[in-house]
Amino acid sequence: MELIIKEGDITYIKSLDRYASPEEMLIGAYELISKVYSQQAVIEAYYRTDPDTMGIRND
């Protein structure tokens, strides 16, 4: 299984085990997204999202 982000001429790929758990997928996505955005931006985005609605928090 692979997670892929393409940004212009650059492609970031995170390969995961065929039977990766949802938790491993999320961690892989965070790792991959941090190649495009700063780690701090990824952490802030994490706290602004609501896992119950899979959307942005309405705080």
Image (cartoon, rainbow, N blue to C red):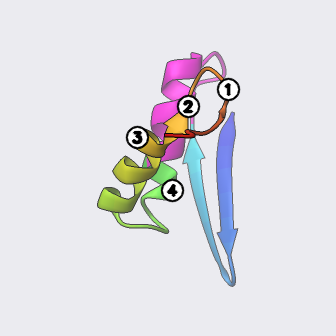
* Residue at image mark 1: 53
Proximity of marks 2 and 1: CB atoms separated by less than 8 Å: yes
Residue type indicated by callout 1 = Thr
- The x and y percentages for residue 23 are 50, 21
Q: Main secondary structure of the magenta part?
A: helix
Residue type indicated by callout 3 = Tyr
Mark 3, Cα crowd under 10 Å, few <14 / some 14-19 / many 20+, is few
Which numbered disc covers residue 33? Answer: 4
* Residue at image mark 3: 47
- Can you tell which quarter of the image residue 25 is in? top right
Residue type indicated by callout 2 = Asp
Proximity of marks 4 and 3: CB atoms separated by less than 8 Å: no
- The x and y percentages for residue 57 are 55, 39
Pick the residue in front: 53 or 30.
53
Mark 4, Cα crowd under 10 Å, few <14 / some 14-19 / many 20+, is some
Residue at 48 percent across and 40 percent down: it is 59
| Label 3 residue SS | helix
- Give the spatial CA distance, label 2 vs label 4: 18 Å
- The x and y percentages for residue 22 are 59, 19
